[in-house]
Amino acid sequence: MARKIGSRYTVHQVIGRGSAGTVWLGEGPDGPVAVKLLREDLASDQVLVGRFVQERSALTGLDHPNVVGVHDMVVDGSDLALVMDLVRGSDLRTRLEREGVLTPQAAASVIADVAEALAAAHAAGIVHRDVKPENVLLDLAAPPGPGGAPRARLTDFGIARLVDAPRRTRATRIIGTPDYLAPEIIEGLEPRAAVDIYALATVLYELLTGATPFGGGHTGAVLRRHVTENVPPVAGMPDGLWRIISECLAKAPASRLRAAELAVRLRELLPELAGLPPLAVPAPRAAEEPLTPAEAVYAEVDAGPGTHRRRRGPAVPLVPAPSPDSTRDTHTSLRRPSAEELASYAAESRAQRSAAGQPAHRRSRAARIRRRRTLAVLVAVLLLLAGAAAAFSAFAAEPPGAAHAFARTPAVALPGHLHPPV
Ligand SMILES: Nc1ncnc2c1ncn2[C@@H]1O[C@H](COP(=O)(O)OP(=O)(O)OP(=O)(O)O)[C@@H](O)[C@H]1O
């Protein structure tokens, strides 16, 4: 069903849904467009509408082949819409889900494209703040790059900043997608261009290995790893890519590459990556262990009840977005941990590392096995004690010859559904 957006656009069909709204296929005066209609609660927020209007020229002015251009921003009654280039293809998350991992050359080519988009944005004073595979569209209508890699185009510029109005994000809270959050954001510093580089290096690592370097498990654990842990090395990763990833995941923002440098370094590597197969990566880690007490302290997720449990999955453990409009789970809002809490996580992390000498996810598996063993021994001891007590009291209370009664008395009461049928 067609619907008018402002006086110049008509939308026909939903292409997809995200946490900030719904994307429609539409038509404008110059041809087909994609129209992102922001969620109703965002559209009715006067602070946000004001920012939307203010940012209009910065966002519509960004013109680059690796950026999904914003043509127009429409405020029309209760509609708040971004009119964008229509990209014919899929997003990088969908491709990653389909293929698991990319070849080193395809991954480097896609990330070089995004780095060029970021270089243009940073030069214009715009920080993206939500670089992740969902926000990279693969344009199948554009000529492919080296090794047949599709052209990557970065979208959702400035949306995180728009939605992240001061009223929504108190100084003590973090808005973002946990796996890609730079440590300085978690520590409360103002996000600058280097946060995009950190997030993009995280995406590169994910394209190569199928998992983000610090993801997996509860959101609190993910944030702690960003601040306190170093990126675990990956067997078989080409040296050149590994050096780039390590530099861009530096904890100190100033030590990271700039976007333009990152693009150049990746493009220089492309010839030597040609023909390399995708990395043989181990099966994804399971992450079902209970929270450590320190993690539980700041694992306070705004998104609603039930989001505190650990999530399974290799890469992007995400929490439910705040609106029924969203079908994909991408953003979280967390209480920012205090300096003391971060220090205690660091100490805890060091203690765990020196105790086990293994990376976090392997440690957590070993810890889980240890916990299970301890529990099994405890249960066995309790059962033995209970059995001995029952035997003793039956022996003491029953006359000789009544042993059959004792034999039918279970030592421990079983829940109804576990009793064998009589
Ligand atoms: N300009 C566009 N052209 C074609 N498809 C698009 C365009 N922008 C977004 N889409 C598609 O619409 C869907 C929703 O996109 P949207 O940007 O709203 O959410 P997201 O980035 O997937 O998630 P989130 O908003 O939580 O970050 C995605 O599947 C994306 O592929």
Image (cartoon, helix red, strand yellow):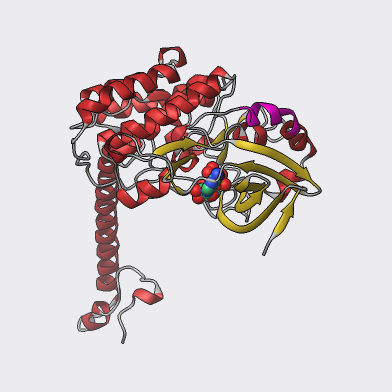
Asked which quadrant contains residue 200, the reply is top left
Q: Is residue 47 left or right of residue 280?
A: right
Along the line of sight, the residue nearer the viewer: 395 or 134:
134
Q: At 61% from the left edge and 48% from the top edge, which residue is drawn?
A: 31
Q: Is residue 348 above or below residue 219?
A: above
Give the residue furthest to the front. 30
Q: Position of residue 92 (x, y in %)?
A: 41, 43
Give the residue furthest to the bottom. 422
Q: At 59% from the left edge and 19% from the top edge, which residue is drawn?
A: 125
Along the line of sight, the residue nearer the viewer: 247 or 378:
247
Q: Is residue 306 left or right of residue 44?
A: left
Asked which quadrant contains residue 271, the reply is top left
Q: Which residues lie in the magenta part?
A: 53-61
Whether residue 56 appears in magenta in the rendering, the answer is yes
* Quadrant (top left, top right, bottom left, bottom right) of the C terminus: bottom left
Along the line of sight, the residue nearer the viewer: 322 or 105:
105
Q: Position of residue 100 (x, y in %)?
A: 30, 47
Q: Is residue 160 left or right of residue 346?
A: right
* Quadrant (top left, top right, bottom left, bottom right) of the N terminus: bottom right
Q: Is residue 101 above or below residue 263?
A: below
Q: Is residue 344 above or below residue 77?
A: above
Q: Position of residue 409 (x, y in %)?
A: 30, 76
Q: At 38% from the left edge and 31% from the top edge, which residue is drawn?
A: 111
Whether residue 40 appears in magenta in the rendering, the answer is no
Magenta region, main secondary structure: helix
Q: How many marks?
A: 0
Q: Is residue 111 left or right of residue 162?
A: left
